[in-house]
Image (cartoon, coloured by chain):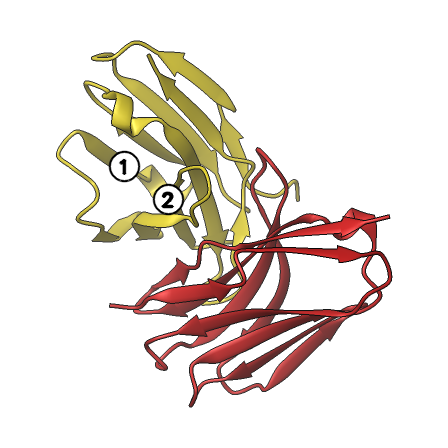
Chain colours: A yellow, B red
Amino acid sequence: DTGVSQDPRHKITKRGQNVTFRCDPISEHNRLYWYRQTLGQGPEFLTYFQNEAQLEKSRLLSDRFSAERPKGSFSTLEIQRTEQGDSAMYLCASSWDTGELFFGEGSRLTVL
Amino acid sequence: KQEVTQIPAALSVPEGENLVLNCSFTDSAIYNLQWFRQDPGKGLTSLLLIQSSQREQTSGRLNASLDKSSGRSTLYIAASQPGDSATYLCGGANAGKSTFGDGTTLTVKP
């Protein structure tokens, strides 16, 4: 098992553009989480899935953010009409139920 | 709403010293607490997971304790090495997700 994979590792975009991040969790894990982290802060929860069901979505997630996990495997996080305040590291993690969390290396977004 | 605080925010020690990092949480109804290490620009690497029924976990030079009643966890690092320099984060899991502190940035000087 190669762990949690995230793609792309770094994305630079202009304000107003749409971006999509992909996360491939550890294959046997049924839960997948998205977090956002800015410099000097801990990760902030965005949303999580159990299998294909999105069970919770943070109020931090505006209508411009959407996440999917079709078939309970990989997940995508899309940000529409990006703003400079969206610049951050987007982290994906997976677990089996409420067990140990494993994180990917993150996708860094820079909005110019 | 769960809030997690880590003290100190930064710590600098000479190589070989033993040290303790602190993590406090407001909601004691956590089902586990996990300690992570994060290197600059990287993701979080899991160090230790303590289930709510456990008091401590050990891995090599690391020992983590959990006291749910007081809302505290500590990470003890023995005989620190320059390679231990990183940011250490704790995450308390309840209501389906983990809530993290802002971390303690550790520098171990040779």
Query: On the rendered structure, is B81 left or right of A46?
Result: right
Look at the image and tell me whether residue B91 can be seen: no
Tell me the chain of label 1. A
Whole-percent x, y for residue A40 in the image: 46, 43
Residue B63 numbered mark, or none: none
Q: Are marks 2 and 1 on the same chain?
A: yes
Secondary structure under badge 1? strand
Whole-percent x, y for residue B105 in the image: 60, 51
Q: Are marks 2 and 1 in contact (CB under 8 Å)?
A: yes
Q: Residues within 10 Å of mark 1 (few under 14, many from 20)?
A: many
Residue at far top of view? A14
Q: Quadrant of the N terminus of chain A?
A: top right
CA gap, disc 2 and disc 1: 9 Å
Q: Amino acid at mark 2?
A: Trp
For label 1, the residue is A67
For label 2, the residue is A34
Relative to B17, does residue A8 appear above or below in the rendering?
Answer: above
**Corner quadrant of residue A5:** top right
Front position in the image: A17 or B22: B22
Whole-percent x, y for residue B40 in the image: 60, 36
